[in-house]
Image (spheres, rainbow, N blue to C red):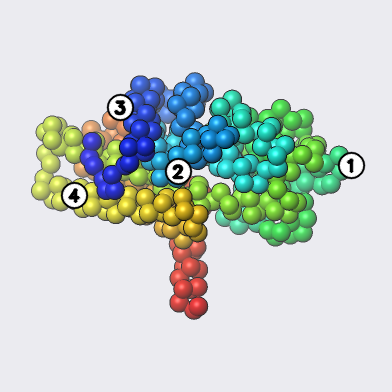
Amino acid sequence: MISFFPELSSHQDFFSQTARDLTNRLIRPTAVEDDRSETFRRDIFSALKKAGLTSLLIPKEWGGQNAGAATHYAVLSELSRASASYSITVGVHQMIQAAVLEYGNDEQKQRFLPGLITGDLLGAFSLSEPGSGSDAASLVTSAKRTASGFEITGTKTWCSNGSDADLFLVMARTGVPGPKGISAFLISRDTPGFTIGKKEKKLGLKTSSLTELVFDHCCVSQSSLLGAEGAGFSVALSQLDAGRIGIASTAVGLAQETLETVWAQGARKTFEFSEGQQAEWAHFFATLQSVVALLFLTASRKDQGLKVTSLASQCKLLASDLAMKMTSSAIDTLGFLGLDPNLGLERMMRDAKALQIVEGTNQIQKLVLSRELDKMVLS
């Protein structure tokens, strides 16, 4: 394997190596077919959770590994080398655990965290709606007060893990227009009035489901409310930094796998590797190293409890753009060999394109960063 700086600690390397062993044994053998058939294998997720890879950020008193952000993101990168979809699934699942841990009351933690940590419950995150993609604060799905709780009505879209999840973190409007009128709810799959809608057909990340959620006068109790009423947008935003770093980690794994695949093919003389192409891929190596270093810096700051919103956007933007460029260039470099599904490059290129869009498009990341620049210059 090609090495990158900084080197993983022994603790981080243990979990990363565990992820590598499991992906080589369980994910790679069926990755091509699962992508073609859009199949998510719950037994693979179960194997990952048994190894402790789905609860790395959770404190040990709740049954987690308390391994830190750098370890979690290193594992996501390792998973994505075999399948970006499983990296996304684990990343989203971790976001639900973190939201419950941060905003849940004692009863909610006792009720949901054990199942999320053991993997008996798979989590899903739902913020977007048909008319409120990038402008998430304009969502219209309503949650009206009732004598016993809330009645939710509306349709959510692009719910990650939607087809396979057991527990859904859903944002709905309980009050005034704008972010202050949004609340967060924990909703079980079997709740009456709640159904899983259509599954989206996608260019990439096909093993990871993206679905509609339909609420038809769905009645939930007061205990389903996560955090204070009106705090739902804060709940959602609290997980966006983690989600964007997770996307960056997934993109880094794709880029690393692409670099090793192309260089190995050149070393084996399966195609004519020109000096110009060697120079191009050497430059990719240097650029990828800088993104890896930024990712580790961001994870380290997150572990220290420092604000990482700007860094998370930078990581997501740079890593996903680089993964897209590298996977596309890999196919240009290898020609028809690069289009062979068994080599994995065409799948990784499709996945990389999806990573530029999810968790806030890269155009949105540029907007976030431009606003950050305004604050820095004008303060």
Q: Which quadrant, please, contains the N terminus?
A: top left
Q: Amino acid at mark 3?
A: Asn
Q: Amino acid at mark 1?
A: Ala
The mark that comes first in sequence, 1 or 3, is 1
Q: Residue at x 45, y 45 (%)?
A: 69
Q: Residue at x 86, y 43 (%)?
A: 146
Q: Nearer the viewer, residue 107 or 226?
A: 107
CA separation, marks 1 and 2? Answer: 42 Å
What residue is disc 2 on?
A: 68
What residue is disc 1 on?
A: 147
What residue is disc 3 on?
A: 342
Seen from this angle, which residue lies furthest right? 147
What residue is disc 4 on?
A: 282
Q: Nearer the viewer, mark 4 or mark 3?
A: 4
The mark that comes first in sequence, 4 or 2, is 2
Element on which disc 4 rests: helix
Whether the residues at callouts 4 and 3 have beta carbons within 8 Å, the answer is: no
The mark that comes first in sequence, 4 or 3, is 4
Element on which disc 1 rests: loop
Question: Where does residue 342 sit, x and y in percent of width and height?
Answer: 30, 27
**Structural crowding at the residue carrying mark 1, measured as other residues with C-alpha within 10 Å and reported as few (<14), some (14–19) or many (≥20):** few
Residue 146 visible in image? yes
Q: Residue at x 34, y 26 (%)?
A: 21
The mark that comes first in sequence, 1 or 4, is 1
Question: Where does residue 338 sit, x and y in percent of width and height?
Answer: 26, 35
Q: Nearer the viewer, residue 275 or 259?
A: 259
Q: Amino acid at mark 2?
A: Gly
CA separation, marks 1 and 3? Answer: 57 Å
The mark that comes first in sequence, 1 or 2, is 2
